[in-house]
Amino acid sequence: MKFKRILVSVSGSMADEEAVRLACRLARKDRAEVLAVYVIPIERTLPLDTEIGGEVEKAEAVLERIEKVAGEEACAVETDLLQARDTAPAIVDEAVERQADLILMGVVYQKRFGQFSLGETVPHVLKNAPCRVILYQHYPS
């Protein structure tokens, strides 16, 4: 499989760096573009362009770190900060708009009600993605 555009969803989790490293390695092979997106969810009671104190700064710091990680891999990465009602549909919509061939998501091992859980975002992306999806699971040591 050859990739032209790889979209990496980042959230500030421990899985982000390795997901970006993997995306860069895949991109280098095919000379693909890498796009890292951070989605800030906005409550329905607020306008979409509302700047939530601290969230934008956190997102920018995460994206700055992602650019450094990509640089360590000798890979150019485009970063984008999105504000949306829900994270998962925003990721899918961005993949459609950018014509991504691959969505790469880092997930952290988590339990909910005593069982492993992927949360809500990953299943929605897996179900609705317009392209292939790779999950990178970070398991805390």
Image: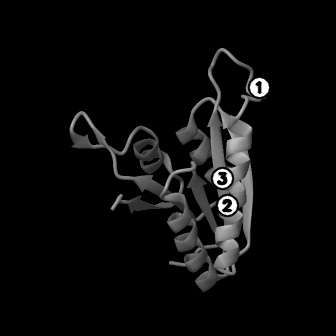
Helix, strand or loop at mark 3? helix
Q: Find disc 1 in the rendering and name its residue.
A: 50
Are the residues at dot 2 and dot 3 in contact (C-beta closer than 8 Å)? Answer: yes
Q: Find disc 3 in the rendering and name its residue.
A: 62
What's the amino acid at mark 1? Thr
Residue for point 33% across, 62% down:
141
Disc 1 to disc 2, C-alpha distance: 24 Å
Helix, strand or loop at mark 1? loop
Q: Which mark is residue 65?
A: 2
x and y percentages locating residue 88 in the rendered image:
53, 41
Residue for point 73% across, 73% down:
76
Q: Could you classify mark 1 by the number of other residues whose Cα lies within 10 Å: few (under 14), some (14-19), or many (20 or more)?
A: few
Horizontal relation, residue 131 to residue 52: left or right:
left
Q: Can you tell which quarter of the image residue 17 is in?
A: bottom right
Closer to the eye: label 1 or 2: 2
Q: Earlier in the sequence, mark 1 or mark 3?
A: 1
